[in-house]
Image (spheres, grey):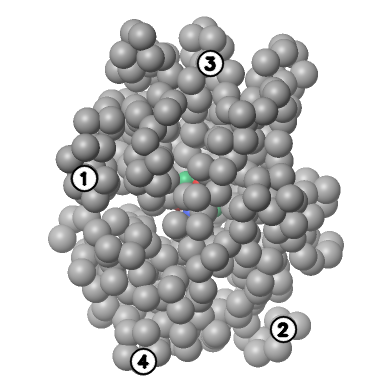
Amino acid sequence: MAQLLITGGAGFIGSHTCLVLLAAGHHLVVIDNYDNSSPESLRRVAELAGPGASGRLAVVEGDIRNAADLERAFAAAPADQPIEGVIHFAGLKAVGESVRDPLRYWDVNLSGSRQLLASMQAHGCRTIVFSSSCTVYGLPETVPIRETAPIQPINPYGHSKAAVEQLLADLATSEQGWRIARLRYFNPVGAHPSGRIGEDPSGIPNNLFPFVSQVAVGRRERLQVFGGDWPTPDGSGVRDYIHVMDLAEGHQAALDKLMKEAPQLLTVNLGSGRGLSVLEVVRAFESTCGRPIPYTIVERRPGDAAITVADPALASERLGWRTRRSLAEMCRDGWAWQNANPTGYGG
Ligand SMILES: NC(=O)c1ccc[n+]([C@@H]2O[C@H](COP(=O)([O-])OP(=O)(O)OC[C@H]3O[C@@H](n4cnc5c(N)ncnc54)[C@H](O)[C@@H]3O)[C@@H](O)[C@H]2O)c1
């Protein structure tokens, strides 16, 4: 089993992936500055992983932009079992905020990744799984979206992800031995079925699922649906939602592949290939929680697409991975988390 460094491991996707990796027997060092998370998530990951596994989880509070913090993270692994691979989740992810504060987004997402890669190189560690996003495709010309679609982001967040993707490709060209997976996630939702860990966005949620579940639990009054006149069957936008546990398993599959095979640069979509409209999600959530979700249809948001759905064929072919969990499971698990933790980890 491998010794791994997980950046941003206290966050939404990171915490679920840590749990999957601990269950698979890996040893983990997490580095997180808790900018958008809480140490409580990792405490619960350790609790869910069980007493045998929690000794395999070390946590370092630190910032990936800081070389000394990364040194402490590399030093947290035992000398006879150095870090062999990195899963790089740490970053900022709110599109609107990135438009308002591009300097911060380029700093954390690009400078942070550059520093991490320099530290990895200094430690002779050349295996990395990177959290990219379907945002790199911008407004897609055709759906479902294949990995060969043009990279044409339309906001600073997407530009910063595309820049890190390019940096990784440049590194792979510059030096032999890099094993790199660039994973382009679609829309991760849901939670671990225990309801102990889940998504805990600070402030007003940017994404549909946390917003819907906060309305259901009474924390927000009503949902705003952006656009009711899209060229879709019910007029609301269509997205490719993926259960966060499926996504976590996708990371495990990518890591296994990188560690087993010759050095390579792998780029895959992680999505289900199935589009669901906003209104379908609202109805499914209502039937899970047994409460109405009041909503208002408002203007479209600039930069939104009508339909964004992955072509998941390459992930299936290259990783032997595909999504397994249904919309009903996304709602059930997301609701179990929100209902038991109405104010997230703070409650
Ligand atoms: N959730 C999504 O919808 C989505 C979609 C596509 C891609 N992604 C990408 O996946 C990754 C994880 O997303 P998430 O939803 O778990 O987000 P998240 O905010 O829950 O997790 C990110 C984690 O990184 C940490 N972090 C931020 N800046 C840091 C820094 N400078 N140093 C150390 N830690 C830092 C945060 O505290 C947080 O724990 C991000 O890179 C995001 O851009 C997310």
User: In the rendered structure, which amino acid carries the disc numbered 2?
Assistant: Thr
The residue singled out by tag 2 in the image is: 232
SS label for mark 2: loop
Q: Nearer the viewer, mark 2 or mark 3?
A: 3
Tag shown at residue 34: none
Which residue is pictured at 45% across the width and 57% down the height?
Answer: 245
Name the secondary structure under disc 1: loop
Q: CA distance from mark 4 to mark 2?
A: 23 Å
Left or right, 225 with reference to 52: right
Asked whether the beta carbons under mark 1 and mark 4 sit within 8 Å of each other, the answer is no
The three-letter code of the residue at mark 4 reads Pro
The quadrant of the picture occupied by the N terminus is: top left
Quick one: label 1 or label 4, which is nearer the N terminus?
1
Q: Nearer the viewer, mark 1 or mark 2?
A: 1
Q: Position of residue 10 (x, y in %)?
A: 33, 42
Q: CA distance from mark 3 to mark 4?
A: 51 Å
Element type where label 4 sits in the image: loop
Mark 3 and mark 4 lie on one chain; the one further toward the N terminus is 3
Q: Residue at x 25, y 80 (%)?
A: 218
- Say which residue label 3 marks: 125
The residue that label 4 is drawn on is: 292
> What residue sits right under mark 1 in the picture?
50
**Quadrant (top left, top right, bottom left, bottom right) of the C terminus:** bottom left
Residue 153 is at least partly visible in this image: no
How far from the left and from the top, in percent, is residue 314? 74, 51
Tag 1 and tag 2, C-beta contact below 8 Å: no
Q: Nearer the viewer, mark 3 or mark 1?
A: 1
Q: Height in image: 226 above or below 132?
A: below
Which comes before the other along the chain, label 4 or label 2?
2
Foreground tag (3 vs 4): 3
N-term mark: 3 or 1: 1
- Position of 273 with respect to 40 (left or right) is right
